[in-house]
């Protein structure tokens, strides 16, 4: 490991609290994470090059997938630029998201669409564990503002909008996304849940987006808030982006990688990288569930499904989310026998509770 990296990962070892011969333990400076208060996982505990305070890569928002090379500054010592707001102009938003028909449709058209949704046969009862498509805001101008907030974030981060997994040349072929390789098991999506997912995709294509607003915070960067009440078990978004082998992302500085496939053979493990192409999912805050308040803040769960023989990651509400609430999804450390640092601090998806 390079010296520039070592100087930022000087966390106390698990036995550092034990005094050694000739040492005065009380005189040593303990280094711990400012977010969770712990000094463990020292291999991913960064030290700010300005204030010398410690932060776990997985406690940062957004999280870092690997220890960065060169200088690194904590959120307090960084001076993020306020992003330029995307124009609140219908034609520009329609072009940006490649919407198939005008965004500001009539109220009658909206009501007709809602009626078709109700006639789709989706069962709402939680005990049957049926997923629900998101319910867009009824006010077309509000939907325009929501999409403008997402366009602002995508433009500021240099990300092209995409609502699907992308298999780019030089990364992995689509055939590599094989759910049968998943070592922990994967849920096979039901017919009803597949209909809900397809309905979400079709609504997004026509400018009826999920009721979410992307907010810029000088300390946290871009975060996402509910712009309307969201019911438990609602599909909020699909996590999308370029699909790549995990082994190719060992030293990737991207801040939003998501585990897509965790195989018995690490060489077959896949991640989603939304740095170049992505949607609103990449701006949803991750919660470190090892911190005391982590699970209390979590209101979304990342769930991997086998959808027509392909692994997909859905972000699903695990409780009712009130308007104005910050959207937080789960983040876990992957098992320690994963040999790559990027795998150890990327998101892990699990079954619905």
Image: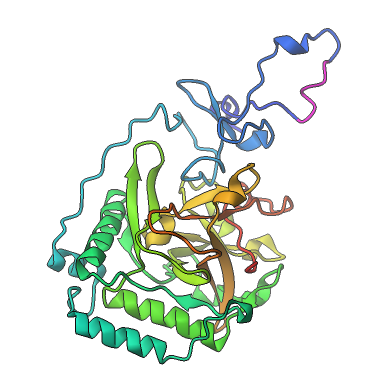
Count of marks, rendered view: 0
Q: Is residue 32 left or right of residue 196?
A: right
Q: Residue at x 68, y 51 (%)?
A: 339
Q: Which residues are magenta?
A: 14-19
Task: Determine if residue 353 is in view.
Answer: yes
Q: Main secondary structure of the magenta part?
A: loop
On screen, residue 19 versus residue 62, left or right, reads right
103 drawn magenta: no
Q: Is residue 197 above or below residue 255?
A: below
Please provide percent x and percent y for residue 42: 66, 33
Direction from residue 230 to residue 108 in the image, left or right: left
On the image, the x and y values in percent for residue 72 come to 46, 30
Residue 342 appears in the figure: no
Q: Residue at x 43, y 52 (%)?
A: 326
Task: Report the front residue among 277 and 129.
Answer: 129
Position above or below: 106 against 57: below
Quadrant (top left/top right/bottom left/bottom right) for the C terminus: bottom right
Quarter where residue 166 is shown: bottom left
Along the line of sight, the residue nearer the viewer: 4 or 41 = 41
- Residue depicted at x 41% and y 92%: 119
The x, y position of residue 49, in whole percent, is 47, 23
Q: Nearer the viewer, residue 237 or 31?
A: 237
Q: What percent of the width, then of the height, locates residue 202? A: 34, 80
Of the 4 image quadrants, the one containing the N terminus is: top right
Q: Residue at x 13, y 62 (%)?
A: 89
Q: Quadrant of residue 293?
A: top right
When the figure is inspected, residue 7 is found, relative to residue 280, above or below; the finding is above
Render colour scheme: rainbow
* 17 in the magenta segment: yes
Q: Is residue 128 left or right of residue 15?
A: left
- Foreground residue among 281 and 235: 235
């Amino acid at each position: 490991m390079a010296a520039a990296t070592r100087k930022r990962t000087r966390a106390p070892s698990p036995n550092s609290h034990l005094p050694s011969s000739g040492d005065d333990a009380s005189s040593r400076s303990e280094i711990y994470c400012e977010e969770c208060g712990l000094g463990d996982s020292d291999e991913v505990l960064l030290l700010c090059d300005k204030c010398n305070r410690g932060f776990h890569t997985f406690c940062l928002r957004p999280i870092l997938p690997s220890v960065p090379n060169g200088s690194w500054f904590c959120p307090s010592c960084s001076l993020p630029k306020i992003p330029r707001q995307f124009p609140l102009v219908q034609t520009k938003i329609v072009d940006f998201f490649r919407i198939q028909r005008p965004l500001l449709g009539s109220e009658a058209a909206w009501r007709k669409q809602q009626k078709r949704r109700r006639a789709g046969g989706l069962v709402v009862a939680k005990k049957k564990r049926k997923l629900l498509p998101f319910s867009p805001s009824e006010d077309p101008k509000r939907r325009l503002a929501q999409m403008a907030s997402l366009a602002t974030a995508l433009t500021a981060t240099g990300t092209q909008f995409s609502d699907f997994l992308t298999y780019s040349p030089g990364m992995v072929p689509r055939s590599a996304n094989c759910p049968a390789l998943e070592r922990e098991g994967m849920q096979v999506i039901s017919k009803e849940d597949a209909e809900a997912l397809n309905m979400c995709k079709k609504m997004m294509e026509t400018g009826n987006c999920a009721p979410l607003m992307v907010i810029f915070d000088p300390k946290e960067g871009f975060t996402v808030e509910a712009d309307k009440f969201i019911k438990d078990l609602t599909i909020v978004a699909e996590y999308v982006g370029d699909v790549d082998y995990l082994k190719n992302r060992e030293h990737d500085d991207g801040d939003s990688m998501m585990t897509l496939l965790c195989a018995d053979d690490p060489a077959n493990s896949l991640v989603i990288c939304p740095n170049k192409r992505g949607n609103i999912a990449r701006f949803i805050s991750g919660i470190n569930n090892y911190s005391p308040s982590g699970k209390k803040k979590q209101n979304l769960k990342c769930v991997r499904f086998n959808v027509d023989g392909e692994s997909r990651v859905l972000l699903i509400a695990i409780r009712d989310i009130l308007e104005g609430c910050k959207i937080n999804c789960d983040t876990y450390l992957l098992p320690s026998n994963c040999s790559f640092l990027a795998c150890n601090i990327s998101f892990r998806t699990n079954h619905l509770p």
